[in-house]
Image (cartoon, rainbow, N blue to C red):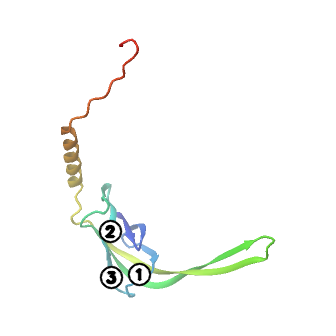
Amino acid sequence: MYAIVEIAGQQFKVSKDQKVFVHRLASEEGTNVTFDKVLLLDDNGNITLGAPAVEGASVEAKVLQHLKGDKVIVFKKKRRKGYKKRNGHRQSLTQILIEGISASGAKKKATKKADVEVAEGAEEAKPKAKATKKTKTEE
């Protein structure tokens, strides 16, 4: 079972007992967090797609530690002008452990019924008659 979930503005494909590095979360180390914005669920081949999120589905995780990522060097240079700028950046990250994926309330059949109702409503509307072109022989 896996899920695609949005965490801190980024989408991750997660499964149970997986460790993931995400942008810094406000939670303290050792606390449990729940992510409700699950975009897709796969339960042994039974795929549930949200529009935009699957209702009732959630991902539970535990915050393991807060840390900083590797240093990224930003170097700018303009040749023959004597212009050189060197800058560095270290992203603040949080390591989380996915403890479980719950799909309670996620129903694949309900989405199909909604699609069928929309299709039936579209058939009831009468299409407008098309304008026909007159050729020179008809005149």
Secondary structure of the residue carrying tag 3 is strand
Q: Looking at the image, which residue sits at the far right?
A: 80
Mark 3 or 1: in front is 1
Instruction: Compute the Cα span from label 1 to label 2.
Output: 15 Å
Q: Looking at the image, which residue sits at the far front?
A: 139
Secondary structure of the residue carrying tag 1 is loop
Quadrant position of residue 102: bottom left
Assess whether mark 2 and mark 1 are in contact (beta carbons under 8 angstroms).
no
Q: Position of residue 126 (x, y in %)?
A: 21, 35
Assess whether mark 1 and mark 3 are in contact (beta carbons under 8 angstroms).
no
Other-residue count near label 3 (Cα within 10 Å), few / some / many at <14 / 14–19 / ≥20: some
Instruction: Compute the Cα span from label 3 to label 2.
Output: 16 Å
Q: Position of residue 11 (x, y in %)?
A: 42, 66
Q: Earlier in the sequence, mark 3 or mark 1?
A: 1
Image quadrant occupied by the N terminus: bottom left
Residue at 41% over, 81% down: 25
Mark 3 or 2: in front is 2
Q: Amino acid at mark 2?
A: Lys
Q: Earlier in the sequence, mark 1 or mark 2?
A: 1
Look at mark 2 in the image and give the residue it sits on.
37
Quadrant position of residue 72: bottom right
Look at mark 1 in the image and give the residue it sits on.
25
Q: Position of residue 33 (x, y in %)?
A: 33, 79
* Residue 111 vertical placement versus 86 (above, below): above
Q: Amino acid at mark 1?
A: Leu
Q: Nearer the viewer, residue 72 or 107?
A: 72
Look at mark 3 in the image and give the residue it sits on.
32
Assess whether mark 2 and mark 3 are in contact (beta carbons under 8 angstroms).
no
